[in-house]
Amino acid sequence: MFTRTESFREYVSSYRAVTGLMFMMMIAFVINLFPLFPGNVLFYYGTGVNLYIAEGQWWRLITPIFLHGTFTHLLFNGFSLAIFGPALEKYLGSLKFSLFFLTTGILANIATYLLLPLTYTHVGASGAIFGILGFYLYLVLFHGSNFSTNERNTVYTLTGIAVIMTFIQPQINIVGHLAGLAAGFLTAPLYWRKKW
């Protein structure tokens, strides 16, 4: 399910949504690394700042999904999307996958806004990526007959490791991760169809 055997060209043409999302994250990082606009404008206006959201800057519930503070942060989230995203995009189709990804990311950011202090700031696509894991968790728990024992165990293991790492690693938006996982799990039935 998560093994990729396509060439780069096949991957790009087969998984347009995953590729597009990764490209947007990389472009945003490069623009921040080599500012094309003064004052790191993407981070200035795009970082999730709870205080500014409270003042009406609602777009900050969306823009943090595409911003990453370090190359390691971008690499980890990009790699996770590249591995976990294709099977779900193939199942949902590019448009629905994009909608699901953005919805779970936004819901994770809303939870961050509601549950963390106004001084809290955050960036990253982790909430949306945890949403993907939540979708897989829903599938193997409620429609497990569509998957092999190995596939089910892989989903359980990856989800467990991701949750454990959330509490171990420093400077992690725990609320965003867990809310993204819950959002993916709870909204998955809206996208479910019998054929996997």
Image: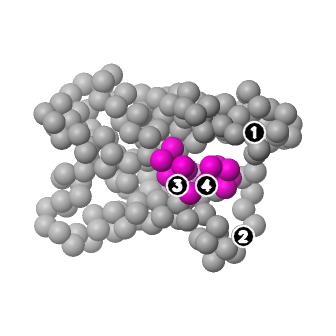
- Looking at the image, tell me whether mark 2 or mark 1 is earlier in sequence order: 2
Q: Amino acid at mark 2?
A: Glu
Label 1 vs label 3: CA separation?
19 Å
* Residue to which mark 1 is pinned: 194
Does the residue at mark 4 contact the one at mark 3 (Cβ under 8 Å)?
A: yes
* Residue to which mark 2 is pinned: 6
Label 3 vs label 2: CA separation?
21 Å
In the picture, the quarter occupied by the C terminus is top right
Label 2 vs label 1: CA separation?
26 Å
**Residue at 82% in and 39% down:** 146
Range covered by the magenta-colored residues: 87-100
The answer to which image quadrant residue 4 occupies is bottom right
Q: Nearer the viewer, residue 164 or 35?
A: 35
Q: Nearer the viewer, residue 170 or 56?
A: 56
How packed mark 2 is, by other alpha carbons closer than 10 Å (few <14, some 14-19, many 20 or more), is few
| Left-right relation of 186 to 55 | right
Q: Amino acid at mark 1?
A: Lys
Label 4 vs label 2: CA separation?
18 Å
- Against 73, residue 192 (above or below) is above
* Residue to which mark 3 is pinned: 95
- Against 33, residue 64 (above or below) is above
Q: Nearer the viewer, residue 64 or 95?
A: 95
* Residue to which mark 4 is pinned: 93
**Which element type, helix, strand or loop, lies under badge 2?**
loop
